[in-house]
Each structure stands twice: as structure tokens, then as C-alpha cells.
Amino acid sequence: MKTKKARLITNLVTYGVLTALFILLTVMIDNKTISRSLKGQLIPICCWIVMAVSLNLVVGISGELSLGHAGFMSLGAFSGIVSSGWLLNGFGMEDPTLRLVLAIVVGGVVAGVMGALIGIPVLRLRGDYLAIVTLAFGEIIKNVMNCVYVAVDGSALRFGFLKNDLPGTLLLNGPMGAVKVKAISTFAAGFVLVIFTLAVVLNLTNSRSGRAIMAARDNRIAAEAMGINITKYKMMAFVTAAVLAGMAGALYGLSMATLVPTKFSFNESINVLVFVVLGGIGNIPGSVISAAALTILPERLRFLQNSRMLAYAVLLILAMLLSNNPLMKSLWKKLIPRRREARSGEGEMRS
Amino acid sequence: MEFLSYLVNGISLGSIYAIIALGYTMVYGIAKMLNFAHGDVIMVGAYIIFCAAQYWNLPPLLSLLLAMLVCTLLGITIEKLAYKPLRQATSLAVLITAIGMSYLLQNTALLIWGANPKVFPSLFDLGTISLFGGRLSVKGETLVTIAANIVIMVGLTLFTSRSRMGKAMRCVSEDRGAAELMGINVNTTISMTFAIGSALAAIAGLLLCSTYPVLQPTTGAMPGIKAFTAAVFGGIGSIPGAMLGGVLLGIIEILGKAYISTELGDAIVFAVLIIVLLVRPTGLLGKAVREKV
């Protein structure tokens, strides 16, 4: 257990470093000293950081393996795109910042409502069964989004399912996804969203509710005996994560010109899980670092051309093997003697 | 008659899922891990058969045996290199390693065989069999798939209930520590499980690509996920459960696509899975484990 002061310092350092990085990158963009590829990745990096931190809330803090996190991102992305397009075409709202903020809020709300609906059945299950059901929901969301058509006709929003016979401007075109999206996301908005996410997750984990969530993770029966309502706190973590993922989705969707529903497949959920595991389960700053690093890494490996993803796979396996090697673990402990003993309750995961 | 023909196709697709699901469920039962690379072993097996039949002109049976041999070696190697060092690690670390292995196999296949889809040759052309005076026609491949499924099911049931190794497998999946104390070599048993699962994957690869003759590096991914779903559906860790889950899933998928909506086929499959798990939280034939306080 960390002391209050130590925790405060860690959190302040996290916020401080991120703010400094943001200022540095903004200056670099103004001076045009930043590489093109990195500049194009700044908004996606913010989105994946939010995704990783929110998934860490479910996997690390709440201790439930979720394999369908990209589904919430998908819901957020498409509802964000629809609301932004509706405001622009139906009401003539030109201001991009206001539209972006509203779209992110809508994305968060839609994903949160679905998160609550999905959470009620899902959280009754345990371990691998819970994981497979989240996977199933992720696939269902992807499949259903493939069949949804949305158009804005005057100031009315029209929905179609499986067939496209809608009047007006088409916003979502079934399997073609969202086309001709006006990209309105900005790096500044991404930064604000990252800070917002960190504030929500860090404050939640350090609160009474957060301690209840972790108690339910560490020992369900003991926590229940202490009068903690397990379902309520598991739901709290799950829905919060869904809302944040939806917000990240809206930001992501509005940074692209086109977006297809199959983008948010099982593979994306797995990618986010990789960020969480490599960053350290339950370690929030770790998730931020690994999400940023692993989003940039495949781009940096581009010189390997065709064997790029092969190299990524090998690095992934080696990272897992080395970090679980007893020899490496003892070496690590000697290097950093005051390293906290597995505070994340890793052993508790689906043991 | 239309319904009957959909049903036969469903059972055939389900048989393929069932054979893949066996690999998942046996490995899960013994090593308590979700082997996400299993779907890609199928893809490797299918490529080996493709090469053997197309380039080296081997007879179909020999190509299949070659693919089974390669897949078995591949399965054992993967287990020894990637999963064995992680026996004591958290299950999440093993899961990520399995996913890394899946990427590795897919991208290696991409480098060797390229991204262009290959058309899988028809290896056993049995023609079409007409029943009920031509009102119901069943493809030869469909019948072979169903027959193979039944043979494998009977064989595996006999193996696990009668042979020494099969009994050892059941022991290890029941209680690894106690099995070790009884003198069972746990490492050999786990290797053997991977070997059987991977050999079955090669057969599944042949059957899958005979039914859907398009072969590319991602061929194994979606059937892999579906079969994994089937294993959970029937109760993960249970061999009859994997069979039942696979066949039911195949029937639901084909009937759903035929009568409800082609686009929503996958969504229907997963929705049924969710409903079943809500009614029976450990799958159709899964054992409920009592929690000790």
C-alpha cells in the first residue's frame, strides 16, 4: 500500500510529464520540426492511450478480462460521427470545437449506455466465460454496425437497417462505414481527453469506490462478507471504461476521412490488451507509456518492410518470456530494490 | 427439403468447428490456457496440403499425413518454446504470448506464401449424391466431413478413456499436482496434448479448405474464434462438449444465414452463445466448480 503522499507525487509527475510533452510537441508542430509520420500519429496516440487506460480499469483494477473493448470504441466513433454530421448538416453548426466536444460527449454516453446493458449479463459470469462473452459482444457490435445506415434529411435523422433507401445526406453507409467525414479532431482535444481520462481513473482508484473495486478483485468472498456490493462496483468500473472508450472512439472517428466498421475488430481489442499487459496490469502510467510507444513502434519498424509485423510478433513474445523469467525478475529486483511488490494483484487474475 | 439441405450443410460446417474446438478444449483442459494460435496452425496445415498437392504432386492422403506431421511438430515446438517457460506465469501473460504466436504464424505465412489468396484444389472429388429423387443433393465433401468428425470423436473418446496416455491426460487436467505425485510426466502429457490438437488442426485445415476453397494467411483466424466459441458453448475442457458445441454452432450459423439474414450470421451465432451462457454459465456440458470458502 502506497502512502497518500507518494501516490500524490506519482500522479503529479504523470500529469506534469504529459503536459510538458504536449507543450513540447505543440512548439515542434509550430516550428515544423516534427516528422510528418509522427505528426499524423499524435491524435491516434491520444486515442489509444485513453483506450489502454480505460481497459486497465477493467482488467487491472477490476480484475475482469475484457476482449471486446474495441466494440465500445466503435459505438463511440460512429455515434460521434453521426452527431457531428447531424449538427453540421441539420442545424448548420459550423464551429468545429463545439461539434467535437458534443460528439465526444454523445460517443461517451452511447458507449456508456451499451456498457451498462452489456455489463448486466456479462458481470454475472466469471473468468474465461466472461472473457468470451465480451469477445462475443465486440463481434456482435462490429457485425451490427456493418448493417446500419444513417442519413440526415433536413434536420431529421433517419435510420435504416440492412437496406439503404434513405433520403438526404448519407452519414453511415453500412459496410462502407462513414465516408467523407469532416476531420475536426485536434491534438489539443486529444491531450485534454487523455488528462480527463487519467483524472477520472486515478481519482476513482484512490477513492472509497476504487478500494471497493480492488477489494472485490482481490477476494470476492471476503469483500462480499465486508458488505461490498460486488455487482455495483464491477459495473461502475465496466461502465466508466465503456464511457471513456466511447469518447476515445469519437475522437478517433472524427480524425479520419473514412472509417469502416470492420476496423474495430477483435484484433484491435487484443492490441489494446497488449498495451495494458506490457505497460503493467493495474499500472496506469505504464499503460500511457506502452500505448504511446507501441503505437509509434510499428511505424518505426517500417524499414523492415514486409517483416515488420513479424518483428513485432517476435518482440511481443520475447517481452512476455523475459518479463516472466525468474532470473530476469530477480535481477530486476536487485536493480530497483524498493520496487513495490506486485501491487496489482496479478496473481488474482483468473487464477 | 430446403431445410434438410441447410441442416446437412450446417452439420458439415459444425463438424469442422468441432474438430478445431477439440484442439482448444483439450489444451484448455490440461494447460488451462487459451491457445489463440490454434486457428493459425489450421492455416499452416492447409498451406502444407496445398503445396504438397499442387507443387509436389503428392497423392491426397500422403499430403494430409505430411501436413499432420508438420503441424504436430509445429504444435510441440510452439509449446516448448513459448508456453512451457510461462507455466508459473499469470494466465494473461500466457494469453498475450499465444496472441504473439498467432501474429508470428500469420506473418511468417505471409512472407512465405504471399498475401494473394490461393485457390485450394479439390482433392477428393466425390461428386454429388442425390437423395429423395433428386430433391436433396449433398456434396461428397460434406459427407466426408461429417464422417471424419464421427471417426475422430469415437477415436478420441476411446483414447482418453482406454489408453494409458489418455488416462494420464485426464489426470493432469483434473489435478496437475496430484498427477505428478502419481508418477505422471506432466511435460510429456502436455506435449502430447498439443501434438494431438495440432494433428487435428491439419485435418480441420483440409476439410475447411475443401468446403471454402480460398486460402490466405488469415484463413484460420475467424474459424479459430468460432471454434473457440463452440468450445465454450459446449463447456470448455469437455471433449463431448466441444463436439456438441461445434455441431450446434454450425447448424445455427447456416440456418441463421438462410432464414434470418446473411449479413447478421455471425451476430446470431454470438447472440446464441451469450444466451446459453446466461442460462448455463459453464456451457452446455461444463462442470460447475463449487467455490470453497
Image: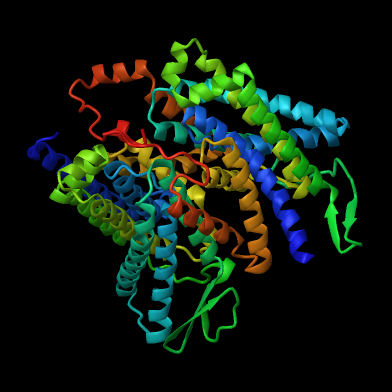
Q: How is the image coloured?
A: rainbow
**Vertical position of residue A28 compared to residue B106: above or below:** below
Outermost residue, bottom side: A154
Whether residue B184 is visible to the viewer of this picture, yes or no, is yes
| Residue drawn at x 22%, y 33% as measured from the top left | A343
- Quarter-wise, where is residue B147 in the image? top right
Say if B56 sits above or below B269 in the image.
above
Instruction: Residue A68 in the image: state x and y as whole percent.
Output: 44, 52
How many numbered circles are shown? Answer: 0
Q: Residue B46 is drawn in which quadrant?
A: top right
**B194 sits left or right of A61 in the view:** right
**Residue A114 falls left or right of residue A267:** left
Q: Residue A158, relative to residue A130: is it above or below?
A: below
**Residue A39 visible:** no
Quadrant placement of the C terminus of chain B: top left
Q: Residue at x 64, y 19 (%)?
A: B163
- Residue plotted at (67% across, 35% down): B201
Observer-nearest of A276 and B264: B264
Residue A258 position, x and y percent, is 52, 65
Give x and y (percent) for residue A52.
35, 47
Which one is in front, A300 or B66? B66
Q: Determine whether, in the image, residue A80 is placed left or right of residue A211.
A: right
In the displayed structure image, the side of residue A37 where residue B130 appears, left or right: right
Quadrant in which the N terminus of chain B is drawn: bottom right
Task: Pick the residue in front: A185 or B55.
Answer: B55
Q: Position of residue A212 (x, y in %)?
A: 18, 46
Q: Residue reaching furthest top?
A: B183
Q: Is residue A288 above or below residue B76?
A: below
